Image (cartoon, rainbow, N blue to C red):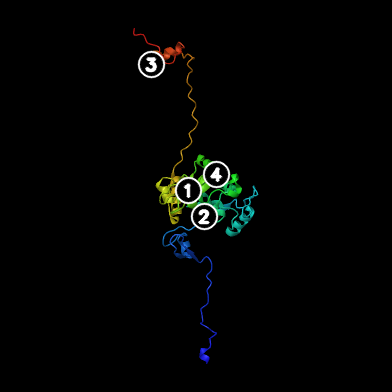
Amino acid sequence: MSWFRKIEKGLAGSGKRDIPDGLWRKCDRCGEIVYERVTRRNYWTCIKCGYHFMISSLDYVAMLADENTFVEIDAGLRSCDPLGFKDSKRYPDRLRAAARKTGLNEAIVTGTCRIGDHRTVIGALDFRFMGGSMASVVGEKIARAAKRAVESRSFLVLVSSSGGARMQEGVLSLMQMAKTCAWIGKVSEAGLLYVSILTNPTTGGVTASFAMLGDVIMAEPGALIGFAGPRVIEQTINQELPPGFQSSEFLLEHGMVDMVVPRSQIKKNLVGIFDFFSSIERPVEEKARPAILKTPPHIEMKADVGSDAETAETGPKTDVEEETEAGVEGDVEEEPGERPQKNSE
């Protein structure tokens, strides 16, 4: 019978639809599925819980700089392999893979721009490029950015997002901590303002160097900021860490950062800070005053003829002045702890 035969056609389905990559984003904190365009309009933050997503260095620069004012500098600098380092991959292979992934030559983008119409030299680390690690080129680009800020009398802004120094360059990467600190010191000596912005995460040698040297230190909400990770600290001290340890809010409470600012308000706060410091009148450098020469004690000063008139104007001399003059004229050397006694007569 035909009705017992299996129908080969089966149920008509609608077919699987391919969803293009980058259309949706899942929040790492609350798990909400957020439309990517909505996330961008909301400064790459979750519309439900306010979680700050990690963004690229170029996106961060575009968010802070005035429109069409950013000009990248030192874009051609690339890392080499001074140690011939190899772990599971060769270091040059890792660099090439990171460059293909991000479209960058290194883990930092630096350039000049205007923020609120103020001349600014800006640099932003990119965590996508080998964890935003600080290598020799990163330190060199930060040093050049600081030098340009000094030469152009501009504000300096550095945005940190890094796991620390890059182990593939060994001690050469650690030397960048001292190098960047020295150049930040030159910015301070020049009387210029340096603002450090800390994002999630900012750890290791970056935290231990230029990131925590800002005249003003901003941090994004919920950012992990510290040197070693909390798990390493717990294993070292054998103690349970307090809730929220190494979060930006925890550091604000303990005086390590100046303010915790949502990403949507960072540029507004930067402009306010720049306006304030630009309005301060710098004191005019005083002309060099002539040195006041004191008469050496072994030289005798002769009094003028009109000394009686001077005495009448200045009044009688005190006992201390008489004793001092007597010591000068007689070239008397006092022994330590002894003073010449005045006769009572």
Q: Residue furthest top?
A: 345
Secondary element at image label 3:
helix
Instruction: Give the answer, above or below, for where 130 lies relative to 19.
Output: above
x%, y% of residue 329?
Answer: 45, 12
Q: Is residue 327 left or right of residue 185?
A: left
Give the number of the disc on residue 127.
Answer: none
Q: Secondary structure at mark 1?
A: helix
Between circles 2 and 4, the one closer to the viewer is: 4
Question: Which residue is depicted at the point 61% across and 58% down?
Answer: 97
Distance between the alpha carbons at the discs numbered 1 and 4: 26 Å
Task: Give the class, few, some or many, for how many residues have Cα within 10 Å of label 1's Cα (few <14, many ≥20).
Answer: few
Amino acid residing under circle 2: Val
Q: Which mark is residue 61?
A: 2
**Real-space Cα distance between discs 2 and 1?**
38 Å
Q: Is residue 75 left or right of residue 266?
A: right
- Residue at mark 4: 177
- Pair 3/2: label in front: 2
Asked whether disc 1 touches disc 4, contact meaning CB atoms under 8 Å apart, the reply is: no
Q: Nearer the viewer, mark 4 or mark 3?
A: 4
State which tag comes first along the sequence, 1 or 4.
4
Residue holding disc 3: 320
Badge 2 or badge 1: first in the primary sequence:
2
Q: Residues within 10 Å of mark 4 (few under 14, many from 20)?
A: many
Report how far apart the C-alphas of labels 1 and 3 lie in the structure. Answer: 70 Å
Tag 2 near tag 4, CB within 8 Å: no
User: Which residue is labeled 1 in the image?
Assistant: 235
> Could you tell which of marks 3 and 2 lies nearer the N-terminus?
2
Name the spot of residue 65 as percent of width and height, x first.
50, 54
Image position of 162 with respect to 25: above or below: above
Q: Residues within 10 Å of mark 3 (few under 14, many from 20)?
A: few
Name the amino acid type tagged 3. Val
Residue 293 picture location, percent across and down: 49, 22
